[in-house]
Amino acid sequence: MGDFLENLFNHAHGAINHFPIALLFVSAGLDLVAEKRPNLRSTAWLLLVLGTLGAVGATVSGLLAHLAYEDDPTLLSAIDVHQYLAFATTALFAFLTAWRWHSLRLGSDIGGTRVYLALALLGLVVLGVTGFLGGNLLTEYGIGVRGITR
Ligand code: HEM
């Protein structure tokens, strides 16, 4: 049981970070499609909220995951780039959520506007690079990976 919980804790970030990646990509995709199918607009908004909550969860779990590597400057500098891009991603989508929530309260949805879509697209690029570099922390640096011995 102790091993199971330790394993679960060690890999919590690897589990949680899939939520923002999946939900935010689909949210922006639905906003694009909603030009032709307006009933999808509210689903795009729901996925934006859930994806942003996922980004906050990924950020918190990532910060906890990195603590064990604080004493290694090489690993830490690789983690740092991933960390700061993750902060930028989370801040951008938190801003989009707040802005869209405000617009909905005023009775209009900014989800289909050019500025919103451009910022969401920028967010997806930064999110994509964040995820790619996160993957590299495992595959290129071996962080959190138990080696295979044959
Ligand atoms: C939007 C926020 C974030 C996303 C989407 C994200 C994404 C990822 C991805 C895709 C991986 C590869 C691991 C896997 O899939 O199993 C990863 C690993 C990692 N990330 Fe993040 N990350 C985020 C925030 C952070 C933050 C703020 C830190 C703080 C330093 C961090 C630290 C790490 C570490 C140490 C690893 C390698 C070890 C492990 O997975 O526990 N991440 N991240």
Image (spheres, grey):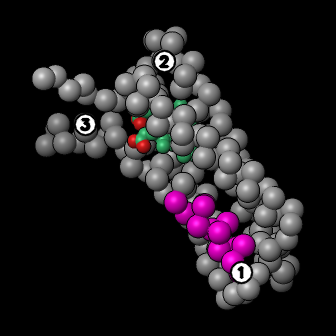
- Tag 3–tag 2 contact (CB < 8 Å): no
Up/down of 121 relative to 8, above or below:
below
In the image: residue 106, left or right of residue 33: right
Up/down of 71 relative to 111, above or below:
above
Q: How far from the left and from the top, in percent, is residue 116?
A: 81, 63
Examine the structure image and report whether residue 33 is included in the region drawn in magenta: yes
| Other residues around mark 1 within 10 Å, as few (<14) / some (14–19) / many (≥20) | some
Secondary structure found at label 1: loop
Marks 2 and 1, how far apart at CA: 43 Å
| Other residues around mark 2 within 10 Å, as few (<14) / some (14–19) / many (≥20) | some
| Other residues around mark 3 within 10 Å, as few (<14) / some (14–19) / many (≥20) | few
Pointer 3 residue: 6
Secondary structure found at label 2: helix
Say which residue appears at 51% left-offset and 12% top-offset: 74
Pick whichever of labels 3 and 2 is earlier in the sequence: 3
Magenta segment boundaries in residue numbering = 22-34
Q: Amino acid at mark 2?
A: Leu
Residue 116 visible here:
yes
Up/down of 50 relative to 44, above or below:
above
Pointer 2 residue: 75
Q: How far from the left and from the top, in percent, is residue 29?
A: 65, 69
Pick whichever of labels 2 and 1 is earlier in the sequence: 1
